[in-house]
Image: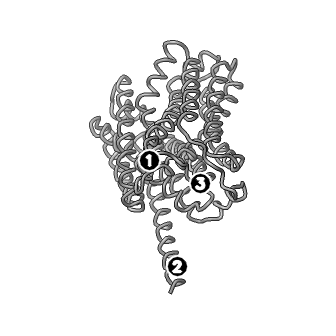
Amino acid sequence: MPVPVLKQNTTLILLALAVGSFGIGTGEFAIMGLLPNIADGLGVSVPGAGYLISAYALGVVIGAPLIALLGAKLSRRTLLLLLMLGFAIGNIASAVAPEIWSLAGARFLSGLPHGAYFGVAALVAASVARKGKRAQSVGRVMLGLTVATLLGTPLAAWLGQMFGWRSLFVLVGGIGLFTAILLWLTLPQDKVHTEASALRELSALMRPQVWLTFAFAAVGFGGMFSVFSYIASTATEVAGLSIDVVPIILAIFGVGMILGNILGAWLADRSLMKTLGGMMSFNIVVLIVFALTAAHPLMLCLCVFFIGFGVALAPAVQTRLMDVAGDAQTLAAASMHSAFNIANAAGAWLGGLAISAGYGYASTGWVGAALGAGGLAVFGLSYWLDQKNRQAAHVGRV
């Protein structure tokens, strides 16, 4: 049910939601730059500390659909407040965890609210948007996540190196608490739909277009992750750049994500399906160019920018899901982020297989292009099904 909101409060609501996505993005990505510090502090190997990333991702995949079902009878305002408080508590628990297994458990708990928060936040953003501005409103919430890759992650990594890795989780937990306060102050109380239930949410899983949208995200976004997971080694081993240049390359990726998020949301409000098909085709071309030119530093940087720009698909995918989920909005919107994390895991795994097989780091571009082609095929099937349903509806009216 749409959140009743005064026009002048819309900006504050979107800002509060974006601060939450900024905190979640910072907490998810910054740990990758501090794994050696955590490993040293807890007396484990770096690969052993890497399981902390897997624990968080597992929490996202499990938490998104589970919380959406358990929270079906809650108002969106109440659910968002509980999710952000849970995220804050999980990160504070991470800061005081005495050993690796308790830290892994805390990271798992921190990941549980991730997908549900983004899903419900996107629904709220769409409900307060002006006519014709849904995707842009969702994009402003997602902007917090992309800004985290450019500003939040390096800031948190620097803080962890200066004051110890535990300070990262203190910072992120603090952002979570601050977000909860902002949401409490800005979000008006909305009413729960009288027919809301876990069973109605599960009805989303009966819709083929919902599964096709999940598949589009899980396969198509895997291309970006197949390259990004190994971009540091590609820069140093293939392009011959210094390790000191890697943070600049990561910043270029972050700038591409921010601009892609803004432009992609604008395009999606004008033609949603053309944005989905066109941007996926664009991503495939960029990934192929990356595979062919990764040895050239300038082309590497240019391709990294455009690979980051490929996140332009995110607002469009989230908006598409709202269109096809019917009354089961919460479960579908939250589960989208499970699909993104599947894309993360699958892209990194398949890229690693290509590298281990001796094809080199640049081969991740070919892997990414193949995944993009798979996503484009799913899009084609979804578009065909749309046309078939429209024809059937037209015949029914006649």
- Residue in the image at 65% along x and 38% along y: 112
The mark nearer the N terminus, 1 or 3, is 3
Name which residue lies at 61% across and 15% down.
41
Q: Which mark lies nearer to you, 1 or 3?
A: 3
Q: Amino acid at mark 1?
A: Ser
Task: Tell which tag, 3 or 2, sits nearer the viewer.
Answer: 3
Q: Position of residue 345 (x, y in %)?
A: 56, 43
Query: What is the crowding at mark 3: few (fewer than 14 residues within 10 Å), some, or many (at least 20)?
Result: some
Q: Dot 3 corresponds to which residue?
A: 1
The secondary element bearing badge 2 is classed as: helix
Residue 241 lies, with reference to residue 271, above or below; the image says above
Question: Residue 186, percent across and down?
Answer: 53, 36
Please tell me which residue is depicted at 46% across the width and 28% down the height of the picture: 153
Give the position of the N terminus as an image quadrant. bottom right
336 over 172 or under it: above or below: below
User: Which of the marked residues, 1 or 2, is nearer the chain's N terminus?
Assistant: 1
Distance between the alpha carbons at the discs numbered 3 and 2? 26 Å
Most extreme residue toward the left, as rendered? 298
Instruction: Depth check: give the residue in front, 143 or 160.
Output: 143
| Residue where numbered disc 2 is placed | 393
Residue 36 in picture, x, y percent from top left: 54, 21
Query: What is the total number of numbered labels drawn onto the structure image?
Result: 3
Q: Position of residue 179 (x, y in %)?
A: 55, 31
Instruction: Say which quarter of the image contains residue 78.
Output: top right
Q: Amino acid at mark 2?
A: Ala
Along the horizontal axis of the image, is 342 left or right of 150?
right
In the picture provided, is 169 more to the left or to the right than 242?
A: right
The amino acid type, in three-letter code, at marker 3 is Met
Kindly identify which numbered label has been placed on residue 137. 1
Q: Is residue 367 visible?
A: no
Residue positioned 56% across, 42% down in the render: 188
